[in-house]
Image (cartoon, grey):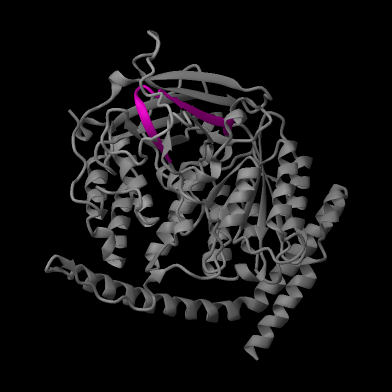
C-alpha cells in the first residue's frame, strides 16, 4: 500500500506541475501570479501528503548509512594494521562495499595527454577551466568507501579546487604567474607551473544579480542528499543577496513551471518559503526547464549586471530533450543571449557528470558538485563573487617551447579543454571564463634537451632540430607564454605575452613555493587515482609529505582535508601507498 500511495503521489505531482507549462512565461504579470499561486498551493498539498512517507524513507536511509559507515571504519582500521612480509604487501581482500565506483553514474572517457616532442609539436593550446566538480565528487566517493573510476578524475579540477597565493592583478583583469622546478613525478624532469589570478571584487562592489534558480524536482531527486541538500544550499545563497538582486524560481519534472516570479533579493522570506515547499516527484523534462528559465532570465535582464541561470540537478533527464548533443546545442544557442549558466550537481547513483560538464562548458558557465553543506557554503557563500561574477571570458592559453632547450612536454590534465593551434587567434572559438578572485593553475612536465630521462627515443632517419641555435634575443627563453581573453562585454580578445626564462629554473624542490609544492601534490594524487602510469618516483606517502610542506596558510582547512583524503584512499587501497619507483625526486645540480 505504501508503494501504491507513493506512485499515486508522484503521478499527482506530474499532473499538477503540468499545470504550469513554460507558455506561462510569455503571459503578463497577472497570469504569472495566478500560475505561481496555483503551483505553490499544489506543492504545499503534495508536501503535506508526502511528509510521513518521506520521514519513513529518510529513517531507512539514515540507518543504512550508519551501517555502511561502521563497516567502512572497521575496514579502514584493519587496513592500517597491514604490514610488509618478505618485501611484498599483504592486504585483506576488500569487502563488497570497497570497490571502484561502478553504477549508473555517467562519466565521459578521455585519454590522458601524452608526452610530445617539441621538434614535432612545439605549441600547446588549451582553454582554462575553473570547474571544481570532480574534486567534490572524488571526495564523496572516497567517503563512501569507493575508489573513483578513472574517468571521474579530472586533474585540473582537483588542482583548481584550491586557491593559490598568486600576485594581485593591477592593470589587467588578472595576473599571470610562472614557476619551474624539479618534478616529483619522474627523475630528471621539471614541472612548469602556470597560474592566473582574477581581480577580486568586494561584496559591496558586486554588480546587481538577476538569478533564475532552475530546479529539478523530478522523482530521481527525491532523497535527502538531493532535494533536501539543494533547498538548504540555495537558502544559504539567498541569505547573501540584497535589494539590488533578483531571484526567480523555475521547477521542472514532467513539465516546467514558475513557482516564484522575479523577487527582490532582500525579500528573503518569500524566496525561502518557495524553496521550502518544493517536493520531488515525476519524470525529468530538463529541456523544457532550460527554455523556461532562460526566457524568464531574459525578461528580468540587468544591463551591466550579473545574469545567470543556476541549474540544480542530478542530470537524469529522461523525457523531452534527452540527447546530450541536443541539450548541448540548446545551451550553445542560449549563451548568445548574454545569460551565463552555473551547474550545481547533486546526488549519488545516477549522477550524470558527463552531461553536467558539457552544459557548463557550452553555456559560458561553471560546474560544481555539492556533496554536503560545507561544499555549498564554499561555493555559494565564501566564493560567491567568483561563482557569479565573470571578469573575463574565452580565456585561452598557448605555450610555445624552445626546441634548443626543451625536448619534450606533457600537459597534466585539461584533456576536455584542448584547442587547435589556430583556435587561439580565432575569437569565434569558445573558451573558459574566470570569475572575480578565481585562481587557475596549469602544470606541464618537461624534459630538457640535455636530460637523460625521456619518454620518446630519438628518431633514426629524421633530421633533429635540437642543435638549432636560438637568436640572441631569446637564447635564455625555454618557452613563450601567450594568453588571450575578452572582457565580458567585448567581442574582440586582448593578448598577453610573457617569456619564460631558463635562468628562472629552480634546482631544488625544497626551495620552490608553497603554490608549487601543494599543486604538484594534488596533481600527483589525481594522476595516482587515474592509474599513475606517468608516475615513477611518487607514491601516496610522497604526496602527503609534499602537501604538508606546501600547505601554508589553510584558513578554512581545505588543504588539511585533502591530506586526510589521501590517507583515506591509502586505507581503502593500500597499493596506492606502494612505491612506484626506486628513487624519489632528486635535486638537480
User: Residue 560: percent from the left, percent from the top?
Assistant: 29, 49
Q: Is residue 265 in view from this perspective?
A: no
Q: Is residue 556 visible?
A: yes
Instruction: Give residue 244's quadrant in the image.
Output: top right
- Predominant secondary structure in magenta? strand
Q: Position of residue 255 (x, y in %)?
A: 77, 63
Q: Quadrant of the N terminus?
A: bottom right
**Which quadrant would the C terminus be assigned to in this image?**
top left
Magenta-span inclusion, residue 408? yes
The x and y percentages for residue 81 are 17, 70
- In this view of the protein, which residue sits in the foreground, 516 or 293? 516
Left or right placement of residue 56 versus residue 543 in this view: right
Left or right, 25 with respect to 391, comes to right
Relative height, residue 515 to residue 96 (above, below)? above
Q: Which residues are magenta?
A: 390-411
Return the x and y of residue 339 as percentages of the image width and height: 70, 39
Q: Quick check: 292 above or below 474?
A: below
Which residue, as the protein is rendered here, is positioned at the far bottom?
1
Amino acid at each position: 500500500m505504501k508503494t501504491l500511495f507513493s506512485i499515486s503521489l508522484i503521478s499527482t505531482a506530474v499532473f499538477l506541475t503540468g499545470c504550469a507549462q513554460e507558455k506561462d512565461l510569455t503571459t503578463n504579470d497577472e497570469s504569472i501570479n495566478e500560475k505561481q499561486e496555483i503551483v505553490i498551493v499544489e506543492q504545499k498539498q503534495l508536501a503535506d501528503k508526502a511528509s510521513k512517507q518521506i520521514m519513513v524513507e529518510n529513517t531507512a536511509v539514515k540507518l543504512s548509512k550508519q551501517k555502511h559507515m561502521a563497516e567502512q571504519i572497521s575496514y579502514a582500521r584493519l587496513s592500517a594494521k597491514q604490514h610488509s612480509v618478505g618485501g611484498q604487501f599483504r592486504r585483506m581482500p576488500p569487502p563488497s562495499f570497497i570497490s571502484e565506483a561502478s553504477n549508473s553514474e555517467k562519466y565521459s572517457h578521455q585519454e590522458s595527454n601524452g608526452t610530445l616532442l617539441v621538434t614535432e609539436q612545439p605549441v600547446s593550446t588549451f582553454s582554462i577551466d575553473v570547474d571544481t566538480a570532480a574534486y567534490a565528487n572524488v571526495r564523496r566517493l572516497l567517503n563512501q568507501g569507493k575508489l573513483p573510476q578513472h574517468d571521474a578524475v579530472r586533474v585540473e579540477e582537483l588542482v583548481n579546487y584550491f586557491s593559490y597565493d598568486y600576485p594581485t592583478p593591477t592593470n589587467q583583469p588578472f595576473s599571470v604567474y610562472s614557476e619551474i622546478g624539479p618534478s616529483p613525478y619522474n627523475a630528471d624532469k621539471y614541472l612548469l607551473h602556470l597560474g592566473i589570478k582574477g581581480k577580486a571584487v568586494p561584496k559591496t562592489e558586486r554588480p546587481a544579480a538577476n538569478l533564475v534558480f532552475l530546479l529539478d524536482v523530478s522523482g530521481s531527486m527525491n532523497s535527502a542528499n538531493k532535494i533536501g541538500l539543494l533547498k538548504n544550499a540555495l537558502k544559504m545563497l539567498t541569505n547573501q543577496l540584497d535589494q539590488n538582486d533578483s531571484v526567480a524560481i523555475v521547477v521542472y519534472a514532467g513539465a516546467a513551471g514558475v513557482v516564484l516570479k522575479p523577487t527582490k533579493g532582500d525579500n528573503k522570506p518569500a524566496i525561502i518559503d518557495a524553496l521550502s515547499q518544493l517536493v520531488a516527484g515525476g519524470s525529468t523534462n530538463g529541456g523544457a526547464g532550460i527554455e523556461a528559465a532562460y526566457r524568464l532570465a531574459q525578461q528580468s535582464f540587468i544591463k551591466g549586471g550579473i545574469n545567470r541561470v543556476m541549474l540544480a540537478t542530478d542530470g537524469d533527464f529522461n523525457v523531452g530533450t534527452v540527447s546530450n548533443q541536443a541539450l548541448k546545442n540548446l545551451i550553445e544557442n542560449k549563451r548568445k543571449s548574454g545569460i551565463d549558466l552555473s551547474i550545481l550537481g547533486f546526488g549519488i547513483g545516477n549522477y550524470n557528470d558527463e552531461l553536467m560538464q558539457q552544459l557548463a562548458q557550452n553555456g559560458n558557465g561553471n560546474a560544481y558538485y555539492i556533496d554536503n553543506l560545507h561544499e555549498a557554503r564554499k561555493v555559494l557563500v565564501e566564493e560567491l563573487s567568483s561563482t557569479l561574477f565573470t571578469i573575463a571570458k574565452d580565456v585561452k592559453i598557448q605555450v610555445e617551447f624552445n626546441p634548443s632547450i626543451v625536448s619534450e612536454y606533457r600537459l597534466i590534465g585539461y584533456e576536455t579543454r584542448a584547442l587547435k593551434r589556430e583556435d587561439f587567434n580565432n575569437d569565434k572559438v569558445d573558451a573558459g571564463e574566470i570569475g572575480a578572485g578565481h585562481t587557475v593553475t596549469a602544470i606541464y612536465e618537461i624534459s630538457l634537451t640535455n636530460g637523460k630521462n625521456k619518454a620518446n627515443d630519438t628518431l633514426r632517419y629524421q633530421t633533429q632540430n635540437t642543435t638549432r641555435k636560438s637568436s640572441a634575443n631569446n637564447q635564455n627563453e625555454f618557452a613563450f607564454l601567450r594568453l588571450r581573453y575578452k572582457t565580458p562585454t567585448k567581442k574582440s580578445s586582448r593578448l598577453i605575452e610573457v617569456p619564460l626564462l631558463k635562468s628562472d629554473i629552480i634546482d631544488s624542490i625544497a626551495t620552490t613555493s608553497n603554490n608549487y609544492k601543494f599543486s604538484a601534490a594534488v596533481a600527483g594524487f589525481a594522476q595516482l587515482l587515474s592509474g599513475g602510469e606517468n608516475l615513477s618516483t611518487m607514491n601516496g606517502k610522497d604526496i602527503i609529505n609534499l602537501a604538508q610542506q606546501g600547505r601554508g596558510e589553510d584558513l578554512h582547512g581545505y588543504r588539511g582535508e585533502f591530506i586526510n583524503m589521501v590517507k583515506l584512499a591509502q586505507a581503502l587501497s593500500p597499493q596506492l601507498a606502494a612505491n612506484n619507483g626506486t628513487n624519489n625526486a632528486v635535486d638537480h645540480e
